[in-house]
């Protein structure tokens, strides 16, 4: 399929069920639990509510959303510039190879430049060789010197409670 058939657009509130469907498809692909009802509501509120925290992009093919990306800004104190963080980028497996992932990524890169970002960052699961190859083809480099860490909400609460 030609890349010109893919249209990238910002998701709107009316796209909520489509967004949740795509997030669920990503969870299935990564063998993770799907977000529960409350998490889905928070996601939609953070995308479309009064205090917008994330932007969601959709890749449409022939009137159907076949992929999505979630982006947000972080900040680099050393560059003194924002960083465009790519939380998710996903294309339904049956629509891979049509250019949707490439066009989503290009749209994010253009958005990073439009926002004055000094860089883009994202994470890739270690087993996802398709993603690793995709990003390397685009000119990205895998960081070796930075090790990601994570602390979950209940762990934060335990830490602050002194347990």
Image (spheres, grey):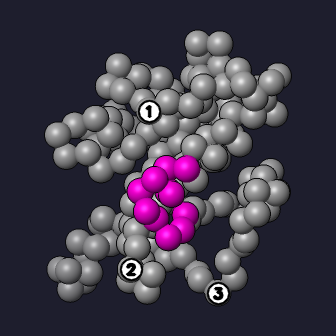
What whole-number distance in Å separates the C-alpha atoms at marks 1 and 2? 27 Å
Left or right? Give the position of 52 relative to 119. Answer: left
Q: Are marks 1 and 2 in contact (CB under 8 Å)?
A: no
Closest to the observer, 98 or 87: 98
**Image x and y of residue 144, in percent:** 69, 82
Looking at the rendered structure, which numbered label has been put on residue 156?
A: none
Callout 1: helix, strand or loop? strand
- Is 126 located above or below residue 56 in the figure? below
| Among numbered discs 1 and 3, the one appearing first in the sequence | 1
Which residue occupies the foreground of this view, 13 or 158? 13
Residue wearing tag 3: 145
Residue 50: quarter of image:
top left
Q: Nearer the viewer, mark 1 or mark 2?
A: 2
Which quadrant is the N terminus positioned in?
top right
Q: Quadrant of residue 27?
A: top right
Q: Write down the residue under mark 2.
A: 80
Above or below residue 145? Residue 48 is above
Answer whether residue 87 is visible to the viewer in this image. no
Q: Specify whether residue 116 is painted magenta.
A: yes
- State left or right for residue 35 relative to residue 157: right
Kindly state the secondary structure of the residue where label 3 is placed.
loop
Can you identify the residue that label 1 sits on? 10
In the picture, residue 136 is in which quadrant?
A: bottom right
State the extent of the magenta-drawn residues as a range: 110-120
The residue at the point 42 percent across, 30 percent down is: 11
Residue shown at 46% from the left, 65% from the top: 117
Query: Would you say 67 lies left or right of 14 here?
Result: right
Q: Earlier in the sequence, mark 3 or mark 2?
A: 2
Is 66 contained in the magenta span? no
Between disc 3 and disc 2, the foreground one is 2
């Amino acid at each position: 399929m030609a890349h010109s058939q893919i249209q990238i657009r910002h998701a709107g509130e009316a796209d909520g069920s489509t967004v949740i469907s795509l997030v669920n498809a990503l969870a299935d692909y990564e063998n993770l639990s799907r977000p529960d009802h409350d998490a889905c509501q928070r996601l939609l509120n953070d995308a479309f509510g009064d205090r917008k925290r994330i932007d969601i992009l959709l890749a449409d093919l022939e009137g159907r959303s076949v992929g999505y990306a979630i982006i947000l800004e972080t900040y680099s104190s050393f560059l003194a510039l924002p960083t465009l963080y790519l939380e998710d980028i996903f294309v339904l497996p049956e629509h891979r190879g049509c250019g949707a992932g490439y066009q989503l990524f290009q749209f994010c890169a253009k958005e990073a430049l439009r926002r004055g970002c000094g860089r883009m960052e994202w994470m890739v699961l270690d087993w996802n060789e398709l993603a690793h190859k995709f990003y390397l083809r685009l000119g990205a480099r895998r960081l070796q010197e930075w090790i990601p860490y994570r602390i979950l909400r209940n762990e934060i609460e335990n830490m602050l409670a002194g347990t």
